[in-house]
Amino acid sequence: MSEAPVLELEKLRVWYGSARGPVRAVDGVSLQIGAGEVLGLVGESGCGKSTLGRGIMGLLPDGAVMDGEVRLQGENIAGLSGRRLRQLRGPEIGLIFQEPMTRLNPLMRIEDHFRETLRTHEPELSKAEIRHRSLEALGGMGIPPTRFRNYPHEFSGGMRQRIMIALALVLRPRLVIADEPTTALDVLVEAQILGILADLKRNFGTALLLITHNLGIVAEACDRVAVMYAGQVAEEGDARTVFGSPAHPYTRDLLRSVISLRTTGLHYIPGAPPSLVDPPSGCRFHPRCSNAMAVCADRDPVEMRAETGQRVRCWLHGPQTQIPAGGHDPLVREEIAVAEEA
Amino acid sequence: MARQTTSLRTYALTRLVLVIPMVLILLTLVFFLMRVAPGDPVSAALGGRLSPQALAERRHAAGYDKPILVQYVNYLGDVARGDFGHTITDNRPVTEVIVENGAATFELTTAAMMVAVVVGIVLGLIAGRLRDTPVDVGIRLFGIVIYAVPPFFLGFLAQLFFGQKLGWLPTSGRASPETQFLLSIHTHFFLIDSLIDGDWAAFKDCFLHLILPATTLGLIISGVLIRLVRVNVLQTLKGDYIEAARARGLGERSVVVRHAFKNALVPVVTVLGLQVALLLSGAVLTETTFNWPGIGFELVRYLNNRDYIAVQGIITFFALVVVVVSVLIDFVNAWIDPRVRY
Amino acid sequence: MSVQPTERRLFGAWNRTLEPIRDARGVPRWILWAGVVLTLFFIIMALTAPWISPYHFDQYKDAAGHRFPKQGHPSSEHLFGTNVQSTDVLSRVIFGAQTELKVVVLAVVVALAIGLPLGLVSGYFGGRLDRALVLVMDALFAFPYLLLAIVIAFLLADKFGQGVATAAIAIAAVYTPQYFRVVRNHVISVREEPYVEAARALGARPRTVITRYVFQNVIQSVPVIATLNAADAILTLAALGFLGYGIQPTEAAEWGYDSSRAISDAGAGIWWTGLYPGLAIVLLVTALTLLGEGLNDVLNPVLRRRRIEPVTLQASVGEAEVEM
């Protein structure tokens, strides 16, 4: 990739206020997505991936604070004014939500949705052009023109999600963020939608940030993958490399928990996701890690490159120079299965 | 388009059929309520004034010596034919009472409803948009206090100020005696009749008489509407499609006005129908306060004179009005919200 | 000191209800507390009426036997003046509070006692009983409430006289359909909740499911409805009194009745006989509405606003503390 990345996150933090203290939903994330690339963002529920998606768009609820940089085509959009953000949302970045059933205004026809969106961002278009563009986008999703004037409730969940994708693509953004786009859909529909998303690159040259908890989807559709845990990126690299030779114990455990036709025994990671208000000291995964060393409970791991090429934050990969004497000893714990309730 | 009109028609027919049980129940209720009182209506009204023979004759003529079930069937038949009988005390056909005084009440309630809708909806939308700001609190307080003011208190204050000290607006009756004497009756709606005649002085006079009672009743009802519209706006703004619209970069103002307000007002239409019951109740009080010769005013008068036939007829009329209005509201609802039709 | 299981359950529910009230901040909090203070003011006034009122509500002579002035201006002896029957307006306002609250509490209790169980049973079991009840209640609900109240009060008055009980029953009859409706709708939505389904799947008897799950959930919406209803009921009672179908003036002082007597006074420029009873109605209804709205803002999950805590981003802890 010789071009500048479409999206660059640098040390992004998103914290919420709560009665118990600040919730560190995103706590120092740095990522890059190149033009036309598909980056999968995986993690368990509550690890902060949805917050990350919304933070990039500037759609955080009241009371959330953001820190760090979000560079879209080189321009830092973190903390921009509402007006500028509104200009970017849609034509530059699109967002596809998880739950398609409720994301369309029930009182507006599909035609109205498209007309409104196009008029807002490209006011110079004529009525005929608007119609042409809309039908083109819908056609690409397999929605026939005869249904252009239907209401949202006349479509199934899968079709509504396709309409949402078409609505996002009609403005031809450079980057699309898909936040768990198939979680609410059944498996067959999921395959269709994934196929469409995977084709985005081919048909439109759009970069895609695919947020999901489903590893299978990532393996199918993504070029690169980032694994998130407790608000931080544990491992990130080429999808095949990460899945083939996982560098981080968490990734390894995740992959082992995936159920396939060959599964004979259920594997799970002991414990529960940590509290984001008061995360564990040092490496946040250490309470549940079977490879934990003494240093892991003490110090935050440093970002390193594994032998197979991916970025990883784990003391198993060094740097040796920063591990004090005795740091390599296995971590002494009272109970391995101490669960910290998230 | 053709598909829609048929659906609305089917819906209309189904809805009309469902009206019948409700009408029957209300009529039965009215019938039996009127017969809870000991004795029969004729004796109650004219007991002391006629000889026992004359009383018996009247009773027979009115059908009160027949068994109850026969009376019930006759009552239903009469209502179906539109025959409400004659009042006992002043021997007017009850239908005449309904038409003449009903028109007066209709004029009053329509004007009041217009005031209520304009004030209530506008203030409710503003309050919902500016949640928890001083404007919102002020509007809410206004709505609460104005609903707490009984019509007769407002009437009392109006009498004090406008009647005595300022004398701008008349506080009693539908029109001054001269106007009433000169006005030729076509529809019993004084405002319309004076327009038909081209009599500007009469129109102005009737209009002035309408202002105080209509504003009094209208403001009180607006209190309810403010609360309802506000809550609906708040609820709608939380909707998923609102977030999706923001994610497409739509301006905050157009999101709120075009998506939220419109969707918030849809349930209000249903509630408007419920307000009719409130309106009619309030009308009785308002008419008594301002000496407005409407049907509520007459009801109180006939009730005081123990004229049960008149009372029965009037209350039956009210029941029918309520049913008709509720059906109309359902129609409008189906027309506005396409989801309801299916 | 073992707490019986039922008690513990009730305490739990009570605490869960009170928690959002304690947490309330900002505008909803002010509305709620304003409502509480104002309502308490009237309740205390009603309870202590015989002691704080300068005179009895139908007293027209002083201790020495001198007659009070008729329609007298407000003065030091009669702070709110006197009305056409030479009774003290202030006393009538104070005793009126007693009357209003007596009737309204009775009416709300009766309406709840009928509407709540009916709504519970009808909503939970459904079927023909439910359909029949809904039809009847909807018909009653759609009818102009004042007319219904007038007719019932009128008819009951013939048999039982115009007293507190009659008025209370008339008002209760008007509001019972409302409780029925609200409770029933709530029960229906709760009935479909997964935890109720789970209980049924585990073999819980309908009675257990209703009392333990459904009732506890539904009961949470009752305080708001009851309070707002009480506000409405006061207006209805005053309306009945104004039209003459309320309480006998000799039995108790009632603000609506006093207002009706005062209308003719307005023509003669006498303002105190109508102003004070009217203001009392406005204030009490406002108080109850503020209380109800405040509770609703705080308890209703739809409207509840999570408290926004301020957040400060501390410097990232342990970011590559390089120690060679």
Image (cartoon, rainbow, N blue to C red):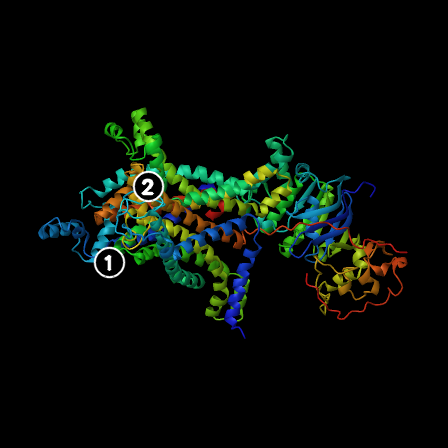
- Could you say which is closer to the camera, residue C149 or residue A208? C149
Q: Is residue A202 left or right of residue C199?
A: right
- Amino acid of disc 2: His
Q: Is residue A192 above or below residue A144?
A: below
Q: Is residue B10 left or right of residue A40?
A: left
Q: Chain of mark 1?
A: C
Element type at marker 1?
helix
Check the image and report above or below for B171 versus A60. Answer: above
Residue A27, visible in the rendered structure: yes
Q: Residue C159: give its label.
A: 1
Going 64% across and 30% down the picture, which residue do you hit?
Answer: A124
**Which residue corresponds to the image point at 59% horizontal and 43% vertical from the top-left?**
A144
Within 10 angstroms of label 2, few (less than 14), some, or many (20 or more) residues?
A: some
User: Can you see residue A108?
Assistant: no
Q: Chain of mark 2?
A: C
B159 or B147: which is nearer to us?
B159
Q: Which residue is under mark 2? A: C73
Q: Mark 2 against mark 1, which lies toward the viewer?
A: 2
- Are discs 2 and 1 less than 8 Å apart at CB? no
Q: Amino acid at mark 1?
A: Lys
| In this rendering, position of residue A106 left or right of residue A321 | left
Question: Residue C162: x and y, percent?
Answer: 27, 55
Residue C199 in picture, x, y percent from top left: 53, 68
Q: What is the tally of numbered marks visible in this picture?
A: 2
Spot occupied by residue C117 in the image (x, y as percentages of width and height): 41, 63
Q: What mark, if any, has residue C265 been given in the picture?
A: none
> Can you give x and y, in whole percent of width and height, for residue A75 in the image?
76, 38
Residue nearest the viewer, comparing A7 with C112: C112
